[in-house]
Image (cartoon, helix red, strand yellow):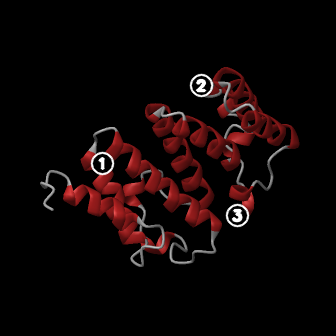
Amino acid sequence: MFASKASQDNALAMQDFPASAVLGEGLPTEAENYLRAAAAVYHDDEMAMRHLVEAQRIAPTHPATLIGLYRFHFYKGRLDETLAVARACLTRAAIDNSLPFDWRAVRPQDAKFGDYDAPQPRFFMFTLKGYAYLNMRLGDYEEGREAIEKLLELDPADKVGARVLLDVLDRMGEEDVD
């Protein structure tokens, strides 16, 4: 469902997006129109996906395009596809924040993770939270736990709410007692 490798290797794929890109800045108008069209026909999976693919063709690595794909797959219950998009979002967030590509190597001092008003570090953290959640839902609890623990290392004040996911993992297997 993603654009071809060749199109991802073009200049746009490596373009640095402004901090406000997660809010849609820098998104070509044509791609934005396709995202809006996909939302308007959300109930029609095939047509919505066509619009999303076109938006991605135009802006393959723009955060807004990736977020649109993520949401579509997530709300349709397509968790494997959502996880693939989450990985693409992590790569995009690593590039935009000048972070290591392996999220495990990211350190608290690498970006303004404590500044909730910094959109790019926040995009990285929420993407990592989604990645953790998806791994948990798909049964990879160890990967989910590692991602949550990384989030809590980067965000000790837990502004993104990772501790809730950790609590779920910790309670798994316990019997419900009334």
**Residue that extends furthest to the top in the rendered view of this protein:** 46
Describe residue 114's horizontal placement relative to residue 71 as left or right.
left
The mark that comes first in sequence, 2 or 3, is 2
Q: Which mark is residue 1?
A: 2
- Reply above or below: 141 against 169: above
Q: Amino acid at mark 3?
A: Ala
Give the image quarter of residue 166: bottom left
Image location (x, y in percent) of residue 148:
35, 60
Give the image quarter of residue 152: bottom left
Image location (x, y in percent) of residue 17:
72, 55
Which residue lies at the image location 63% right of the left edge and 72% below the top edge? 118
Q: Nearer the viewer, residue 73 or 1?
A: 73
Describe residue 94's horizontal placement relative to residue 102 as left or right.
right
How crowded is the residue under tag 1: few (<14 C-alpha within 10 Å), some, or many (20+)? some
Describe residue 27's horizontal placement relative to residue 113 as left or right.
right
Q: Element at badge 1?
A: helix
Q: Which mark is residue 40?
A: none
Disc 3: which residue: 19
The mark that comes first in sequence, 1 or 2, is 2
Q: Amino acid at mark 2?
A: Met
